[in-house]
Image (tube, grey):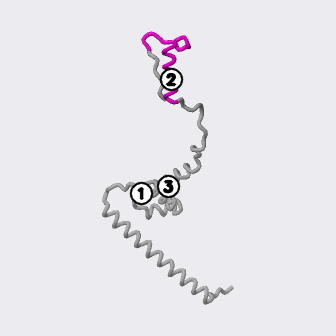
Amino acid sequence: MKSVLHPWQLLLLILAGWINRQEQDVIEYLRAENRVLREKLGKKRILLNDDQRRRLAVKGKILGRKMLERIATIVSPDTILRWHRELVAAKWDYSGRRKKIGCPPVSAEVVELVLRMARRKPELGLRSHPGRTVQPRTT
């Protein structure tokens, strides 16, 4: 069976090759720019905020470990993938939705009032022990 390229297929292949070459040139430029910035920074550690870590984690996960080993310069591939795992774990954590267990804490005013009443009228049931004074609980 003979396969012949039609003129539109040839044109499409040429266009795809040209676009690919342009993208490779952009990537090479960005790599060189990263190297220059890294040289200027020296051995100093780069401190990233949460949003920057999130962006690197999402993009790094898409690339995968092998590609990250080739191109990652400011943090290791293991770090980027760990950030992604933590993002996924935080997304499915739902700890903020859990209900609080137990009674709500008693305000300091109420505690002070109860202790004042207990000191005035020991017959209410609050026993004082020798050598101990009644102290409010701290929570």
Q: Nearer the viewer, residue 121 or 18?
A: 121
Verify whether residue 111 appears in magenta. yes
* Residue 115, above or below 95: above
Q: Secondary structure at mark 1?
A: loop
| Front disc: 2 or 3 | 2
Q: Name the kind of residue labelled 2 in the image.
A: Leu
Residue 45 in percent (x, y) is at 35, 54
Labels 1, 2: front one: 2
**SS for callout 3:** helix
**Which residue occupies 52% across, 50% down?**
86
Q: Earlier in the sequence, mark 1 or mark 2?
A: 1
Q: CA distance from mark 3 to mark 1?
A: 10 Å
Q: Position of residue 90 (x, y in %)?
A: 54, 49
Q: Residues within 10 Å of mark 3 (few under 14, many from 20)?
A: many
Which element carries disc 2, helix, strand or loop? Answer: helix
Count of number-bearing discs: 3
| Cα–Cα span, label 1 and label 2 | 57 Å
Say which residue label 1 marks: 75
Residue type, label 3: Leu
Question: Mark 2 to mark 3: distance in Å?
Answer: 55 Å
Amino acid type indicated by mark 1: Val
Examine the rendered structure and indicate whether residue 123 appears above or below residue 86.
above
Q: Residue at x 58, y 46 (%)?
A: 93
* Furthest residue toward bottom: 7
Residue 81 - label? 3
Range covered by the magenta-colored residues: 107-132
Crowd around label 1: few <14 · some 14–19 · many ≥20 (10 Å) = few
Label 2: how many Cα within 10 Å (few below 14, some 14–19, many 20+): few
Who's the residue at 66% across and 87% down the image?
2
Our reading of the magenta stretch's main secondary structure is helix
Residue highlighted by disc 2:
113
Q: Is residue 57 or residue 8 the one in the foreground?
A: 57
